[in-house]
Image (cartoon, rainbow, N blue to C red):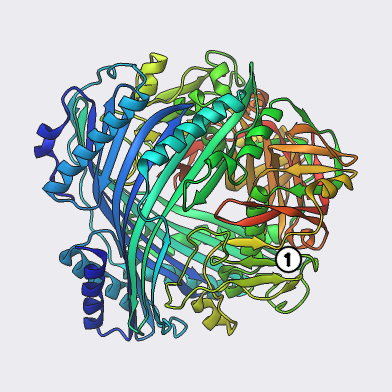
Amino acid sequence: MNAHDIAQYAMQKLQETGAQQYACEAHTSAKREFNVDGGKFSLLRTTIDNRLDLTLIKDNRRGKTLINAFTHEAVDEAVRDCLASAEGSAPDPAWELVSGTQRNFTLGAPDGNMDHLFARTQEMLQSIQQEYPKVMVEQMIVAHQRAEGIYLNSLGARYESLEGLYEAQVMFSGHEGEKSSSFNFAAVVTDNLLKPFLDQGSMRQNLADAEKQINTIASEGKFVGTVVFTPDCAGDVLGELLGNFVGDGVILDGTSPWKDKLGEQVADPRITLSAAPRHPGIVCGERYVSDGYLSEDYDIIREGKLNQFMLSGYVANKTGKKRAPNSSDSLVMQPGDQTLKELLSGIERGLLVSRFSGGSPASNGDFSGIAKNSFLIEHGQITSAVSETMISGNLAEMVNHLRGISRETVRNGYSLLPWFAVDGITISGK
Amino acid sequence: MLTDIISKHKDAFAPGAATELRAQRNLSRRVVLRAGSITQNQRTDTKGIGARVYRDGVYGFASAADMSDDAVRAVLRSATDNAAFLARHAGRGTGELPAIAQGSRPADPDFADLPQKAYIDCLQALDSYIQQKYPNLDSRTLVSSADSMEKLLLTSDGYTSHTLAPRSYIYVMLTAKGKDGSPVEVFEPLGGSGTFDAHFADPAALYPAVDRLYEMVMQKAEGIYAEAGLKTVIMAGELAGMLAHEAVGHTVEADLVLGGSVAGLYLNKQVASPLVSMTDFAHTAFGHTAPLPVYVDDEGVVAEDALLIENGILTGYMHNRQSAQHFHAKPQGNARAWLFSDEPLIRMRNTAVHPGQHKLDDMIASVDDGYYLLHTGNGQADTTGEFMFGITMGYEIKNGKLGRAIRDTTISGVAFEMLKSVDMVSDTVSWASSGFCGKKQPMPVGLGGPELKCRVTIGGR
């Protein structure tokens, strides 16, 4: 059965349960993927899969079941299980679906060109080997995925989608004799094959840096300095900040230090941070939320003020706050007015951090971890690559100690982020 | 259990090409109770057919969610075509894989799939206990999680098997207000291999563990920040296991060795104190069934232990059939796949440091100024052996005695240097098995060890 037929059947069965609200989302997907391991082609993989996601709310009790079999028997069993889950649950009026509209979305390149994709994959591997001879490719995965689906809910929402995207990710390290750098990686998602993968996102920058990170120094002592996060690392750090301060869990249980700060200044006024799946720099971003409404871009932090929590409809209802207009993590940060060179030039002593390997930040935002694939900044210049260097600070304090944001951004299809520099980070070596 | 729909299709295997055909089902249940509200209540059931074909040094793989006879044959054709395509364009000329033992393993026993209500009821009983007994907590989160992997495997030249591996956990997270007003958390998984009802038939049996955790969070609320720098620490078994898995285990996975791991330089060299030995156990460890036993892997290789470090010497790597061919080694059953749509990768199973002869009390008494590190929230390591673990519970040690609890911190080091500093190893092993290892695909793994006394860099505030 195809996604449309199975979704219609599932909706009929969900209705028969007597649920007041119900929804189903059915997708079929086909993926072809080239794998390289240890610098050599290793695997060509083709996967055909389905996904049927059922939700029902009966007497304020919610159940959810996910299966991948598109048969009447499997749907019948899944609906029974979904109903049993709901009936076993506690009533909670905060669960609700919302009325929606009817839309069709065609995104990206549904019909991938596999010959061209293989040529781009070969080209990428050869280019790395020729242009970055000290780099060893640990693993490279290049794929095209086509997905076709439909979302229906009992309040009239009907969203049909057909999309296709190309993804390339590579994991690598620099080597010279018995010395090696830490591993690093880069990834891009795109809807076309017009440009080599290597010319997109942070691919070339990270590969070039890996060659420079073979010889490192272990920084000595401990000092408070400036840290510049690359766009790749910025995404991770900002993700931790948002999860700790504005996400569902910490608002629901009231442990977020920002829970009462809506509309207040929580960060430097130069910081505007958005969840923007419809931004032109985001490839195949979310178009609807599974509660039933269409996704819209929004600012989480606007000019330093907390503008919107990242809340699901459920937590919004539980807490009396506004639900977020999308559920994506397509982060876009407003660029600054300095070039990266200008940003670096004013830094007396600090670190350029490309990857952060740290524990989950504490609830209050305290974080510590290793600065991986990183360089010392001394007197405005990038100098030695470092190893065994830890950084620690507090996420909330960090966004208030902003030194600057670069004008340049990295567009990798998942996010659109600049470099940003913060003061007051403790940097400690041996 | 899955009906055997694959055995009759061996005639469709490509002649002369090592082939694996797998029917697989993954079931999971997850309920989250946060501050008394059920925020997640979900069952997931995923099944399908996957096939992998080896030709001229490269693999073709294909999978489909459809479990019909037609789908099985189509998947085999597609995997064969993929292998032929890649061999034509990027074949390595490495010839056939070396022979492995052939045979059949009897099917594992089935288990009853409990209704979701059982998971919810257990959590609600536990939540009610915590809410009533400890009203001063800032927050509490309880998660019940159960997953199982069932695999029917048919191979051209190895073992056939029908395995079913369930595991079940309840995660307890408690949050209290610290003395400076900021929240502090502790976290502990309870449970292990087996079904949910086998572990959690009586929620009251969990109360002592919750009481201990409450005591910890209140100690941590009054806790201090660890002093940064290179320190003498005693790592609890959970951390020793994390070290064995993250900082050593990954570097000695043969695919990562071929990708540039530092362990490629260290085979048969001293990488740790002579007190340290380490094994990736297949199914039995130290006379008991390992936390997540593996008997046959997804290449049809009969699983056996992989000794990694013996008395401080790096003795070997973990392999799949192809890497074993490259290194002239014997595959030992480390090739595993997460879903039907995943190809087998080199994965750890139950990786542990061997116990020593010291008593924990004597180890603590031997430390003038250091830390006893109990729980870790997460860990990451590099192919250079550099590692980082988040520490979520620990105590200072002053003059040979345990002192105040410490707040969250991080430890780091380079595994093959740090392990040389180990000078005491306790005689008791503890295991953890609730987590997933991430390496292209997730995979349940067991990890464990005794207490280790060593020197690591600890991050302060």
- Measured as percent of width and height from the top left, residue A299 is found at 65, 71
Residue bearing mark 1:
B182
Residue appearing at x 58%, y 23% in the figure: B262
Identified at 32% across, 86% down, the residue is A20
Q: Amino acid at mark 1?
A: Ser
Depth order, front residue of B62/B31: B62
Local crowd size for mark 1, using a 10 Å CA cut-off: few (<14), some (14–19), many (≥20): some
Is residue A155 placed above or below B125 in the rendered structure?
below
B149 to A303, vertically: above or below = above
* Secondary structure state at the residue bearing disc 1: loop
Q: Is residue A413 left or right of residue A234?
A: left
The quadrant in which residue A262 appears is bottom right
Q: Which of the 4 image quadrants contains residue B211?
A: bottom right
Residue B339 horizontal/vertical position (percent):
33, 47
Using residue A153 as the reference point, say whether residue A401 is left or right of it. Answer: right
Q: Residue at x 46, y 19 (%)?
A: B316
Residue B104 position in % (x across, y down): 17, 31
- Taking depth in this image into account, of A404 and B332 the one nearest to the observer is A404
Q: Where A396 falls versus B376 (above or below)?
A: below
Q: Residue at x 22, y 25 (%)?
A: B17
Q: Chain of mark 1?
A: B
Left or right: where B31 falls relative to B270 = left
Is residue B282 at all visible to an observer of this figure? yes
Q: Is residue A124 above or below residue A60?
A: above
